[in-house]
Amino acid sequence: MEKKEIIVAVAGNPNVGKSTLFNVLTGKTVHVANWPGVTVELKQGVKKYRGKVIKFVDLPGAYGISASTMEELIAREFIVHGEPDVVLVLADSTAPERTLYLPIQILELTPKVVVALTKSDLTHKHGVHIYVDKLESILKVPVIPVSAIKGYGIRELLNAIIDVASGKKGRSNTLVVDYNGLEPFIKEVESYITKSKALSKYPSRWAAVRLLEGDSRLEELMEKAGEKDILDEVRKIRDSIKRSTGKDPSEIAITSRFNYVDSIVKETVVRAAGEQVSVSELLKLLGKAVVDQLERIFQHTVLGPIASLLLLFLMFLIIFTVNTGFPVNVLFDLLGFTELAEFVEAYSLAGLVELTFEIISSSISMLLEAQNVAPWIISLITDGIIAGIGAVLTFLPLIMFVSFFLAVLEDSGIAPRIAVAFNNIFVKFGLTGRAIYPYLISIGCNTPGILASRTSIEEEERMSIIGSASFVPCQARLVVILAFVTTYFKIPLYQAAAVISIYLMAFLVTLTTALFIRRVIFRKKEKPELILELPPIHKPSLKVVWWLTWSYSKHFLKKAGTIIFLVSVLTWFMINYGPTGPVDDISQSYGAIFGRLLSPFLTPFHINPETSWKVAYALINGFIAKECLVETIVLLEGGDIDVDEALLALGLTRVQTYSLLVFMTLYVPCLATLAVIYMESRSVKFTLGITVYIITVAYLISLIVYYILSLTTLYLIF
Amino acid sequence: MVLTLDKVPVGVKVKVVSVLGGYGIVNRLMQMGLTPGTIVEVVNNMGPIIVRVRGVTIALGRGMARKVIVERT
Ligand SMILES: Nc1nc2c(ncn2[C@@H]2O[C@H](COP(=O)(O)OP(=O)(O)O)[C@@H](O)[C@H]2O)c(=O)[nH]1
């Protein structure tokens, strides 16, 4: 009665090579799904092998399963309540001394384990040799060396999984680690908790050790089940251990586990003295020299941040240029190469996509007209639907480029070095260098940026990032900024100055907000502390980079794609229909009605009352998705009109344009971002509070900018 | 005098004696391998401290490093 479907939970330390192996195992079948027992979505993928359907579930990377972080808790809950047939635990074969800890800890919880030794193609280079057979005989579960990059060991791994699932191989009982001085207390706690219903799902020895270590999750379960009396007994024992040894039981337990790891490593791992570099291979030596040099630069207090900034600056320069022509077009223009500047702009990806869609849209409308299709249908198809798809596709290359560069930084191991380099600056704003990840990703798109806040160890830091990251101008906002700036500022130098100053302002507001959230909302005075693993710098693998790029981009397409598309169609409806049905005059439409409701807020900017409702309505749409802002204005002006003509029709002054841009950059994040802020903070109060804060800050800053610019001599240069 | 990790010069190997601090942080550091008795080598000591421990390189904030008590080997 063997089951046809096998569920495999995949666990491992961060950087152990889990995503890479997961991709090799499951290929393109990956998607996220909800699982019983855990409240979050987990990635899963399927592999058909030997007539079985093996379903892999990717647990969050964690160092242990002590539930001291969210990742650890999620991983553990799934192992206990998700009822996997096998837990595949990864250990890094280049660092077995550290990474064998997790398999040991999981073996204490469940015997259904397969251990994979990842990156085994690197062992030779690192001078590590692991006696796999011996390791297998000690752990009594299959241990399989694999290389996801070179693709070996995969078949053996799948065989081992099937064998363990069917009970042909592996152990039948959990692993018993010797906890020395804790042993008598473990026995005592075990005798108490046999009565506990809350813990019935957990092996009793394991639960006893965990309780002695102070496991907040298990305690919570017991309290909920009304077993406070048992818990009190356990706490008494814990306190008495603390008093008699002067040590926290968790310290004793972790040390015992690592001692056990050490004893295993001693028997099964040989490390050649020093790093093994084969001198004959000159190239390798050269590579090592480059890596060492990079390492030294990034770790330097002054050079590190400078190198990081330069690298990021260069990266975004390339991305922006390829996508929009900016800022290289401006540079060429400055130098007098006007034609070249136009060329760069026209042949930027955004330019090309725009052109393609203009052609498609006009040929379809001609085709439909010839068929005598009703004009409103033609208008819906060309101005609504096709324009919507076009807007989505204009963004795809942008997102892919950002994703690509981020993937390279991540896979090469440069990203954590950048985090270290930024740490000294970020600490002043109540953040660690780790915060650079979410912010960097936010430059591409805020939504995945906010999701990346999960890398924070400390809850307050995580909330500071969640609340502040939406001030980072995403690429959608860059497009809005560029559209306005190139329309209203003719001199390239001013264009560049306007864009750069808005970015700098936004970054400053972001960091200040992070500090504000930490100090004022959480009243936390201490600085957060950095803990970050630095994997070796290496040449990025194309395969991995492509996977990462594609997974980021797919996320964008799915999320933003649908929203942008829907908003385009909705906008088309809002401006073509009014309370009286279809309208010819836009100023009678629903859109105009909404816009007029909000336009009083724009009065302090002295915007022409004739057009201010259009700006206001565009701002509403910008809330649904920022990229729709310019879209909306174009549609408001009739649809088949160039972006710059449409913007000029608003009749703004340059000072107004600039202050409005400041507002548009800072004000409410788009709907999707708000949804993620709520998802990650799990607090309606926080989400609403942050929204009000963001709007207020954006409004005040842009007003201040407007009045300063209007009143001072700065006015002259505008 | 107690020696803490942030005072250790570059290139020197020391042995962890204990880790101070709250439950979460102690747990985290220990699970990353900084258990009492473990040998740690300081690789860099400007800004965040960078150490090699159990075959892995880890960066620690200075405040964090101050909580790791070590002794010379
Ligand atoms: N040489 C080699 N490198 C690998 C292998 N698997 C992963 N890596 C690298 O190890 C790093 C971490 O891998 P990743 O899958 O992102 O780790 P995760 O954090 O566990 O998901 C990446 O830079 C990978 O390129 C492997 O089999 N061989």
Image (cartoon, rainbow, N blue to C red):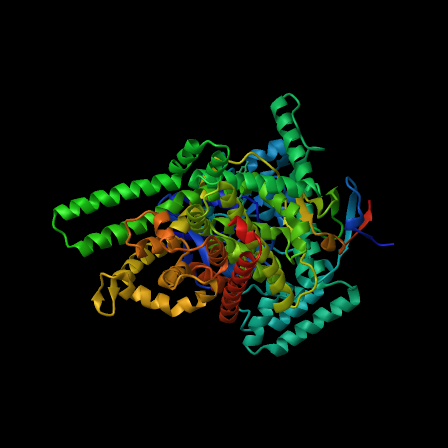
- Residue A302 seen by the camera: yes
Residue lying at 62% horizontally and 76% vertically, measured from the top left: A230
Q: Is residue A132 left or right of residue A387?
A: right
Toward the viewer: A67 or A402?
A: A402
Q: Is residue A489 left or right of residue A505?
A: left
Q: Is residue A457 above or below residue A266?
A: below
Toward the viewer: A579 or A210?
A: A579
Name the quarter showing ligand 1: top right
Q: Position of residue A299 (x, y in %)?
A: 69, 41
Q: Indicate the quadrant where residue A287 lies.
A: top right
Q: Position of residue A285 (x, y in %)?
A: 64, 26
Q: Quadrant of the N terminus of chain A?
A: bottom left
Q: Indicate the quadrant where residue A191 lies.
A: bottom right
Q: Position of residue A655 (x, y in %)?
A: 49, 55
- Residue A158 seen by the camera: no
Toward the viewer: A558 or A93?
A: A558
Residue that protrudes farthest toward the right in the picture: B1
Number of numbered markers:
0
Toward the viewer: B43 or A143?
A: B43
Q: Position of residue A246 (x, y in %)?
A: 78, 64
Q: Indicate the quadrant where residue A311 lies.
A: top right
Q: Is residue B57 left or right of residue A316?
A: right
Q: Is residue A409 above or below residue A226?
A: above
Residue lying at 77% horizontally and 41% vertically, measured from the top left: B10
